[in-house]
């Protein structure tokens, strides 16, 4: 018989149970559910609903239920609809009818919202630690490659020379924003709905602030209707995780591309590369393809759940039960992909010679225009003249640097002998020394700023 079976004369249909029950996935919130119940038992004891002895009995029983879950000996019964009913059922088996007093003034509606917020908070910390670890290995790799020059791309066409450290650090800042978003969403998740009852609030004079504090929440909700039905925290979490996954997908794409032998810029460690069952020479970056591909399901979880929320009437509706599988899946997805991405970046071998060999003279076209600008020509005209120089070189089938000062002087008399100094990739990156630029000295400062950011972020959480 279900806990709510009083008004029914027939048992629930088996197919309905299969649809309705959430125990299959929400049992992973057992810790949060039991912590919530222990705190709630203390709170209602304070207002006289339980005697101190009854509260002790209930808390002792809950401890035993917890121990059973931890030991893997908790035996589910067919009537266990969800984690809340399962815990209460077992508690009552262990301590007797007094267990039935625990739910006084409480509903599964405020209970599930409480449990899930607690679970999401833990998950956020777990993902944050993974993102932090990825940031550290990016910094460590970057520090090894401050002077390594490679092609930088826009539109996936060679653009300008950059340092490999600068490329790696670009992902550091994406992760920094992801972690800031996580910390921000964490604040709104850390709000206790406990005491909202089914929807209208509690008739008990419980101390909601103390209850919230005991459970590690920063504050408690001010409107019970909102308290039981607010799933913004779940949607926000799904968004933050989807965007984090999107960043990993971009890193994944760069790694896939740059490890292609036609680029050859990087080599994945053997432990993190995969082969082909047919083509013996293959060395695939499967894990980074998965990092790229998994973004799809993270975004799917977000859009799916937002669609569930759209148009829901006030207040709790069973649709909200869809929150958990979406968030669980996004967290699990990142928890499985991120350790591998971290290890890949940590063990990644960069091939500076290959990167250098890929630097074509065209990458210095902007520098050539800058040269004319330094001689007083407006940039727009300089751009045009260098375009002609590129065309001239292409027509002769040579690189820009092969054009002699004389040939260039035919396009503009501002070109003199010293133009040869432009054709230097190291000098090109070194010139971009302003904050945020690719020059080794600028990236050195960038890394100082990154390490500072890491210090502040740790202090916040
Ligand atoms: N399993 C439910 C959920 O995850 C718990 C709340 C059920 N409340 C209810 N009134 N049926 O949302």
Image: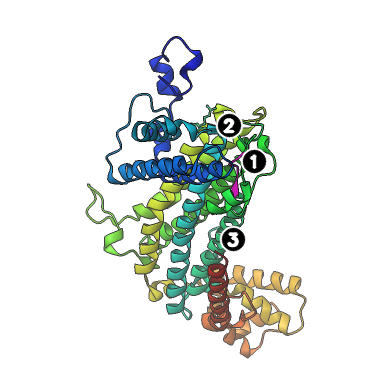
Nearer the observer, disc 1 or disc 3? 1
The residue drawn where x is 43% and y is 33% is 99
Q: CA distance from mark 1 to mark 3?
A: 37 Å
Q: CA distance from mark 3 to mark 2?
A: 27 Å
Q: CA distance from mark 1 to mark 2?
A: 34 Å
- The answer to which quarter of the image holds residue 455 is bottom right
Residue 132 marker: none
Give coordinates of residue 351: x percent, y percent. Answer: 37, 72
Question: Quick one: which residue is furthest to the top in this view?
Answer: 9
Is the shortest distance between ligand 1 and the CB of mark 1 under 8 Å? no
The residue tagged 3 is 180
| Tag 3 and tag 2, C-beta contact below 8 Å | no
The stretch drawn in magenta includes residue 297:
no
Q: Main secondary structure of the magenta part?
A: loop
Quarter in which the N terminus is drawn: top left
- Position of residue 424 relative to residue 131, above or below, is below
Nearer the observer, disc 1 or disc 2? 1
Give coordinates of residue 357: x percent, y percent. Answer: 42, 73
Q: How many marks?
A: 3
The residue tagged 2 is 308
Q: Tag 2, which secondary structure?
A: helix
Q: Is residue 436 left or right of residue 300?
A: right
The residue tagged 1 is 205
Residue 413 appearing in the image: no
Q: Tag 1, which secondary structure?
A: loop
Q: Magenta part of the protein: which range?
A: 190-195
The residue drawn where x is 58% and y is 50% is 212
Question: Quick one: which residue is furthest to the bottom in this view?
Answer: 417
């Amino acid at each position: 018989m279900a806990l709510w079976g009083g008004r029914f004369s027939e048992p629930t249909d088996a197919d309905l149970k299969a649809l309705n029950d959430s125990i299959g996935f929400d049992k992973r919130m057992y810790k949060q559910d039991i912590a919530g119940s222990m705190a709630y038992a203390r709170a209602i004891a304070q207002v006289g609903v339980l005697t101190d002895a009854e509260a002790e009995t209930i808390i002792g029983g809950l401890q035993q239920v917890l121990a059973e879950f931890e030991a893997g000996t908790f035996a589910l019964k067919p009537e266990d609809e969800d984690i809340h009913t399962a815990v209460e059922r077992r508690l009552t088996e262990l301590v007797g009818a007094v267990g039935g007093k625990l739910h006084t003034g409480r509903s599964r509606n405020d209970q599930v919202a409480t449990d899930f917020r607690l679970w999401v908070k833990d998950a956020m910390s777990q993902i944050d630690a993974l993102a932090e670890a990825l940031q550290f290995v990016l910094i460590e790799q970057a520090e090894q490659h401050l002077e390594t020059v490679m092609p930088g791309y826009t539109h996936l066409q060679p653009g300008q020379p950059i340092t490999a450290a600068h490329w790696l650090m670009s992902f550091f800042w994406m992760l920094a924003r992801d972690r800031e978003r996580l910390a921000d969403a964490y604040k709104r998740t850390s709000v206790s709905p406990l005491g909202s009852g089914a929807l209208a609030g509690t008739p008990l004079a419980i101390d909601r602030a103390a209850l919230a504090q005991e459970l590690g929440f920063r504050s408690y909700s001010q409107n019970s209707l909102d308290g039981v039905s607010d799933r913004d925290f779940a949607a926000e979490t799904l968004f933050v995780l989807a965007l984090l996954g999107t960043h990993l997908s971009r890193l994944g794409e760069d790694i896939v591309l740059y490890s292609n032998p036609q680029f050859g810029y990087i080599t994945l460690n053997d432990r993190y590369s995969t082969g082909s069952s047919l083509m013996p020479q293959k060395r695939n970056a499967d894990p980074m393809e998965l990092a790229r591909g998994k973004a799809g399901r993270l975004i799917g979880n977000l859009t799916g759940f937002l669609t569930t929320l759209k148009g829901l009437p006030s207040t709790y509706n069973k649709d909200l039960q869809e929150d958990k599988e979406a968030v669980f899946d996004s967290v699990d997805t990142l928890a499985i992909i991120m350790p591998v991405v971290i290890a890949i970046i940590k063990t990644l071998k960069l091939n500076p010679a290959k990167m250098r060999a890929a630097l074509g003279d065209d990458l210095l076209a902007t520098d050539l225009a800058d040269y004319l600008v330094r001689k007083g020509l407006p940039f727009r005209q300089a751009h045009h003249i260098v375009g002609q120089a590129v065309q001239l070189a292409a027509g002769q089938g040579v690189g820009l640097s092969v054009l002699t000062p004389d040939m260039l002087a035919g396009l503009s008399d501002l070109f003199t002998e010293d133009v040869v100094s432009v054709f230097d990739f190291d000098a090109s990156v070194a010139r971009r020394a302003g904050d945020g630029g690719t020059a080794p000295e600028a990236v050195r400062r960038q890394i100082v700023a990154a390490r500072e950011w890491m210090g502040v972020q740790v202090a916040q959480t």
